Structure formats: C-alpha cells, structure tokens
Image (cartoon, grey):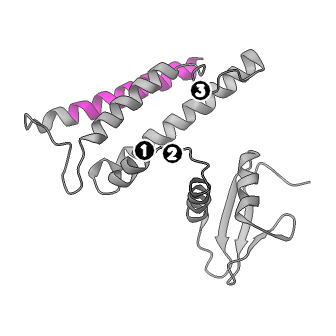
C-alpha cells in the first residue's frame, strides 16, 4: 500500500520519460495530473542531476490544459501574472495566490462538512464576498502596474498611495485569513 502522506516520487530519465517509483512503471503528464486531482502531492526529480523539476512539470500540465480549451485562467489573469514577473509586486503575488487558494480549500472543506453537497461551487464558499473584494482591489492595483516602472502609474503622481494600497490589501488579507480560521 502506497504511503499517501509522502509526496509521490517521479523520476525523469535522460530520455525524458517519467518513472513512478511506487508502482515501478512509466507515467504521462496526464497520469501525474490525475494523481494531483486525487489529492496526492507529487515530487518530480531529474534522475541524473537530482534537480527538482516539479514546478516545471506542473506549469506544463497547466499549459496543456489551457491549450486544450480547459481554461481556468482568464486572459486578464494570465496577463497580470506575466506583468507581475516584470515588476516589484512579484513578491506579493505568490503569497496572494497561495492565500486565495488556501481560503478556497478551507471554504470547500467547511462547506462539505456543513452540507455534504456542493450546490454552487464558488459563491457559497464562506468569506467569498470578502475574497472577491480583495481580489478586485488587487487586480485594480495590478492594472495600474506597467513593465519597467517601480509602481502603479498615478495621475496625481503620489507614490505613497500605492504603498498604502498594498499595505491595505495585506491587512485585508490577514483579516480575511483570521476570519476563515475562526470558521
């Protein structure tokens, strides 16, 4: 019986084939996506160098699903993600995304406990409205960001207000996380 507490170790051979160390067979990206959907953590390493390739393969799985029409990420979100790599805001984006998905997971599990059914997947998540407001504020802030600048472009030229908005978003996120943890 496989130990599902530990990440499933997948080794990539020089031929780029992926080898499941638990079942001793070769797997595809779709197989790996299935493991993840089933709730299993996965670790993909290069056999020769020992480099962790997990992020690279997860991004590849997402790209393949998006290109097949299984779109989850709207164009404006993808655009904002690309933009975040060229600005100083990229230090906030990972925490924001992680917190958003954590809130979604917590809300889903709470809903499963309370209802046993999943009637309306997103709008019934506890704290959804607060999360939505926070994400809208974040996206509004990101919309003002331009590559090669140190912050959002302001009509009034007030650089301090961008920092204040970011601090406000961080406070809102912390308050939302506290509310969700009480649920």
Asked which secondary structure carries label 1, the reply is helix
The quarter of the picture where residue 181 lies is: top right
Q: Give the residue displayed 38% in from the left and 50% down from the top.
A: 79
Give the magenta range.
Answer: 163-183
Q: Residue furthest left?
A: 156
The answer to which of marks 1 and 3 sits earlier in the sequence is: 1
Determine which residue is flagged by label 2.
Answer: 73
In the rendering, at what x and y percent does residue 182 appear? Answer: 57, 17
Determine which residue is flagged by label 3.
Answer: 122
Q: Can I make out residue 147 in this image?
A: yes
Question: Is the residue under label 2 in contact with that under label 1 (CB below 8 Å)?
Answer: yes
Q: Spatial distance from mark 1 to mark 3, Cα to Cα?
A: 17 Å
> Is 181 in front, or is 124?
124
Q: Give the residue displayed 55% in from the left and 30% down from the top.
A: 103
Q: Spatial distance from mark 1 to mark 2, Cα to Cα?
A: 6 Å
The quarter of the picture where residue 12 lies is: bottom right
Determine which residue is flagged by label 1.
Answer: 77
**Is residue 182 one of those drawn in magenta?**
yes
In the picture shown, does residue 40 fall above or below 14? above
In the picture shown, does residue 179 fall above or below 77? above
Q: Spatial distance from mark 3 to mark 2, Cα to Cα?
A: 15 Å
Asked which secondary structure carries label 3, the reply is loop
Would you say 163 lies left or right of 154 here? right
Q: Give the residue displayed 67% in from the left and 22% down from the top.
A: 110
In the rendering, at what x and y percent does residue 29 appear? Answer: 70, 63
Q: Can I make out residue 6 in this image?
A: no
Q: Residue furthest right?
A: 1
The answer to which of marks 3 and 2 sits earlier in the sequence is: 2
In the rendering, at what x and y percent does residue 41 appear? Answer: 70, 52
């Amino acid at each position: 019986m496989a130990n599902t507490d530990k990440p499933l170790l997948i080794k990539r051979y020089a031929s780029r084939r992926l080898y499941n160390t638990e079942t001793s067979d070769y797997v595809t990206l779709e197989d790996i996506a299935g493991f993840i959907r089933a709730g299993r953590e996965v670790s993909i390493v290069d056999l020769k160098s020992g480099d962790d390739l997990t992020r690279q393969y997860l991004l590849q799985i997402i790209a393949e699903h998006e290109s097949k029409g299984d779109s989850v990420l709207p164009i404006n979100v993808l655009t904002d993600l690309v933009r975040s790599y060229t600005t100083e805001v990229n230090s906030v984006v990972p925490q924001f995304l992680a917190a958003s998905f954590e809130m979604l997971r917590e809300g889903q599990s709470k809903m499963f406990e309370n209802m046993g059914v999943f009637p309306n997947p997103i709008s019934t998540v506890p704290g959804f409205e607060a999360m939505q407001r926070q994400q809208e504020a974040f996206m509004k802030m990101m919309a003002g960001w331009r590559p090669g600048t140190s912050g959002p472009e302001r009509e009034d030229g007030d650089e301090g207000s961008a920092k204040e908005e970011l601090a406000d978003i961080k406070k809102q996120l912390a308050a939302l996380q506290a509310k969700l943890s009480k649920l």
